Image (cartoon, rainbow, N blue to C red):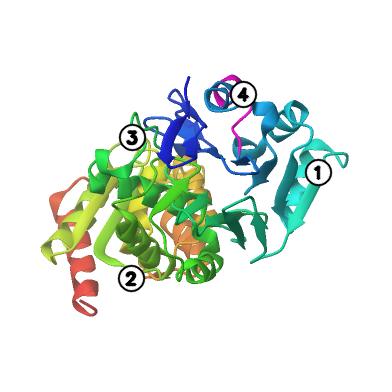
Amino acid sequence: MKAIKIKDDIYFVGAFDFNLRNFHGLDVETGTTYGAYLIIDEKVTLIDAVKPGFENELISRISSVIDPKKIDVIIANHGEPDHSGTVKFLHELAPKAKIYASVNGEKSLKGIFGDDLPVIAVKNGETLNIGKRTLTFYHTQMVHWPDNMVTYSEFDKVLFSNDVFGQHFAPSKLFDSFYPKERILYEAKKYYVNIVNPYNKMAKKALEALGGLDIELIATAHGVIFKDYIPDVKALYASLVNNEKQNKAVVVYDSMWGSTKLMAKAIAEAFIEKGIQVHLFNVNESDQSIIFTEVVDAKYLAIGSPTFNNGILPSIAGFLTYIKGLLPQNMKTIAFGSYGWGGQSPSIIEKELKEIGLEPLVPPIKQYFSTHNEDFDRIKQTVIEALDQIV
């Protein structure tokens, strides 16, 4: 396998993981990449590495340009093993190479590989001259680990962004413009909201710090390299860190014998009648990361489960646990569900949503067994009347 030139003296030498379908619970449709970049200068520099198991691909690509033993500098923008899991292997191959990481990155690497790994910790804004290029390091804490940083080459106008602007997408061609803009932005959104969303405030600070850089390429550690779509992905991130909302509702449910499903449809119809876009999900039919990609910028979220063992169905309990960890904000909620006895499920759902600061649009809606049209018309009207007060 050969290196892929992305700019004069800069090469993609990372790996393609086409078979990956799940990454820490995140649905991955086409696989992903582990972006590593080789800069040929007075000091041969490798920015980021690859996941263990992909060493041969990394070395093969580097070897197509230069002997890997001639690497002088290894920059670890992030300590997570999909980016730095082969750093020690590389250092054993090129023992004279100096390893650079953020202050927290040094802790991560030594925690993973042991204290004998020589790592030079760099401060935010610190620079490193490698010849005709001077690289600048910017700490991007909690985007998405405490150790994250990015590396900027002013000479090339390239931002080596690691996880920032990443997408779990395995492209056959590296640059963004080979793919529909909507597809790439969706993958970037899905990646951000399911990984970085709990740290929005920190992400906003990081974006502001990078805002003044003159950037022609964003060389990510996952997915395409941004060139033509840079303004678009920046605008997407600005929208996400500011919790901007669309006029949209997401209805999520599970059902035992169909009553809760009919309730979900009635609630969806209420939103539609008020001109609000609706996404209706059976939680068993769509991956939770796909559902949350729509939830994050919705104005309304409805979640339904029948009462089950005096509680809620495990599928809905799992989804609530998932979204509670991702901290969605600024949306009105509806908790609903059918029952044969007990009827606790809507109140349980509402309580869970209130714990993360989401306030109800209406009191919990519960329905005893019924599949009668008049019952669902009543549910629909309840939601419409509540929307009339705020829409």
The residue under the point 82% across, 43% down is: 118
Q: Earlier along the polypeptide chain: callout 1 or callout 2?
A: 1
Which range of residues does the magenta coloring cover? 49-58
- Look at mark 4 in the image and give the residue it sits on: 55
- Look at mark 1 in the image and give the residue it sits on: 110
Q: Earlier along the polypeptide chain: callout 3 or callout 1?
A: 1
Q: Earlier along the polypeptide chain: callout 2 or callout 4?
A: 4
* In the displayed structure image, the side of residue 377 where residue 306 appears, left or right: right
Q: Position of residue 29 (x, y in %)?
A: 37, 32
Mark whose residue sits in front, 3 or 1: 1
Cα–Cα gap, marks 3 and 1:
42 Å
Amino acid type shown at disc 1 = Lys
Mark 3 burial class by Cα count in 10 Å: few <14, some 14-19, many 20+: few
Cα–Cα gap, marks 2 and 4:
52 Å
Q: How many marks?
A: 4
Asked if residue 40 shows in the view, the reply is: yes
Amino acid type shown at disc 2 = Leu
Under circle 1, the secondary element is: helix
Amino acid type shown at disc 4 = Glu
Relative to 61, residue 315 above or below: below
Which labelled disc corresponds to residue 285? 3
* In the displayed structure image, the side of residue 186 where residue 71 appears, left or right: right
Q: Main secondary structure of the magenta part?
A: loop
Under circle 3, the secondary element is: loop
Q: Quadrant of the C terminus?
A: bottom left
Amino acid type shown at disc 3 = Glu
Cα–Cα gap, marks 3 and 4:
36 Å
Q: Earlier along the polypeptide chain: callout 2 or callout 3?
A: 3
